[in-house]
Each structure stands twice: as C-alpha cells, then as structure tokens.
Amino acid sequence: MEEKFCISKNLDLVSEKIHEAERNAGRKEGSVRLLAVSKFHPVDSVFAAASWGQTLFGENRVQEASGKFPEVFEKYPEVKLHIIGQLQTNKVKAAVKIADTIQSVDRLDLIKEIEKQASKINRVINIFFELHTGEESKSGFSSKEEIVDALNYIAEGNAPHVVPKGFMTMAPFTEDEALVRKSFVTLRTVRDELQSSFPQFDLSELSMGMSGDYEIAIEEGSTMVRVGTAIFGERQY
Ligand SMILES: *Cc1c(COP(=O)(O)O)cnc(C)c1O
C-alpha cells in the first residue's frame, strides 16, 4: 500500500515536471509522452502505475517482460509495452508477442527477424532506430548511413510488418550537461535529415531523456522520455 502510494505520487511529480519543461521550452502541452521503465521492479509496481493511469511501459529484457506483462494486459488492455534493451535475435519471437514497439533496433538483421516473427502472428510492430550518440553507451547503430540502409530496405517493401516511427538514444552518463545536450541534438538532427529523405514515413518520435536528464531532452525536442528510477525507486539488481 505504502509502495503504491509512493508510485502514484512519483507519477504526479514526474508528469508535472514534464509539463513544466514543455512550457519552459515553448512546446505544446502533451507533446512529450512518458514511458514508465519498470525493469527489475515487481509486477505489483506495474499495477500501481497502471491504476494511476499510466499506459506506456518500457522493459529491457524480454524474458522479464514476458513474465510480468501478460497479467497486466489482461487487467489493463490499454497498456502498451516497449522493449528498450539490446535485443538478441533469438528473443525476437517472444518480443513481438508482448511488445507494441521495439525502441532498441540497432541492426538491419534485427529488422529482418522482427518482420519474420511478426508476420507469422500477423502483428505489426513499431520500431525506433537506436543511434549511438554518446561515448559510454555501446548500443545502437553507429552511423546515420546504416540507418539509411535500413530505411531503404523497409521502403522497398521488404518488411511490411515493421513500421518505423522515429529514433532513440541514451546520453552518456556524465555530470557534463553540454555532453548530454550534444547527444540529444545529434539525435534530433539525424531525425530531421532522415525525415526529409524519407517523407513516406512518419519519423517524428524522438525517444530521449531518462530520470537524470529528461528536462534537457525535452528542451531539445524529445517526444518520449523513458523514466524508471524517478517513478519506481532504485532498482535491486
Ligand atoms: C533503465 C533504462 C531507462 C530508465 O533509466 P532511469 O535512469 O531509471 O530513469 C531508460 N532507458 C533505457 C534504455 C534504460 O535501459
């Protein structure tokens, strides 16, 4: 009960801060969505957030998500799950069963596997291209050119069950605000360039910003912040 109270208070607070950051940046209220990252937290925490009204959740590991989310979907059919952690090819089959969106797409082969598995169960999966923009994180496509190749592959009609929606990045873990901001600006610039090269897709989503840096991300154009700790507390690994 205590825990549930805490989670809804945190959600109130984070939502208020998001709105404040939208206002400060001169952006429309509601232009930034909140993805609640529940990795390493029990399903009861997910239920607490869902009963508050949270509908978007993120998990890093497919196995953990597969253990938690089926019962969440049963009680809250409006809930959507995004996979945000590095995804091995052999986990794609399980991922497309539970996830609406895969944000951590970092290679063309992964797109091919998502298409293969999603087509088998007649589902359409949204994807974000993860771009490596900071020194410390190792995940993501390492260049814009590789993403262009992937977009061309989809544009040629090779992956009808895969819908590109935008981009994701993790800023470096540093106190240096300029470095964090640079990483977000890089993602936004790549989004703008690729959106004009591929007008047939809506690539408007920019998933950037976590508990420690989401206000900066909103200033730089984030459309979705991925917040774990500030909602659910510290993770017990
Ligand atoms: C864990 C994680 C988050 C949330 O991090 P917090 O600092 O707890 O808000 C966001 N994005 C990704 C990719 C993550 O792995």
Image (cartoon, rainbow, N blue to C red):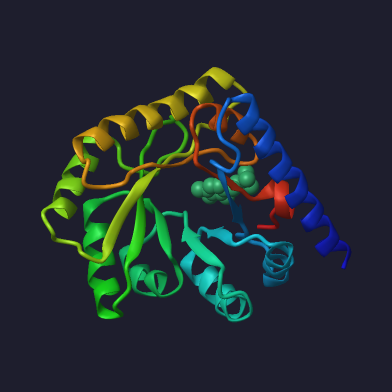
Residue 156 to residue 185: above or below: below
Q: Is residue 213 left or right of residue 97?
A: right
Q: Quadrant of residue 97?
A: bottom left
Tell me residue 140's x, y (percent).
Answer: 36, 43
Q: Quadrant of the C terminus?
A: bottom right
Q: Which residue does the image show at 22% across and 57% down from the upper left?
A: 109
Q: Residue furthest front?
A: 28
Q: Give 237 or 193, whichever is nearer the viewer.
A: 193
Question: Which residue lies at the image location 58% right of the left edge and 25% below the top edge?
Answer: 25
Residue 41: where, in percent of width, then height? 67, 63
Question: Residue 8: x percent and y percent?
Answer: 78, 57
Q: Residue at x 35, y 27 (%)?
A: 189
Please provide percent x and percent y for residue 4.
81, 64
Task: Report the number of discs.
Answer: 0
Is 200 left, or right, of 66 in this rendering? left
Locate residue 123: give its quadrant: bottom left
Residue 20 lies, with reference to residue 122, above or below; the image says: above
Compared with residue 93, is residue 127 higher up or lower down, i.e. above or below? above
- Classify the position of the N terminus by image quarter: bottom right
Identify which residue, 196 or 84, lies in the foreground: 196
Q: Is residue 42 above or below residue 103?
A: below
Query: For this rendering, which residue is in front, 171 or 78?
Result: 78
> Can I make out residue 52 in this image?
yes
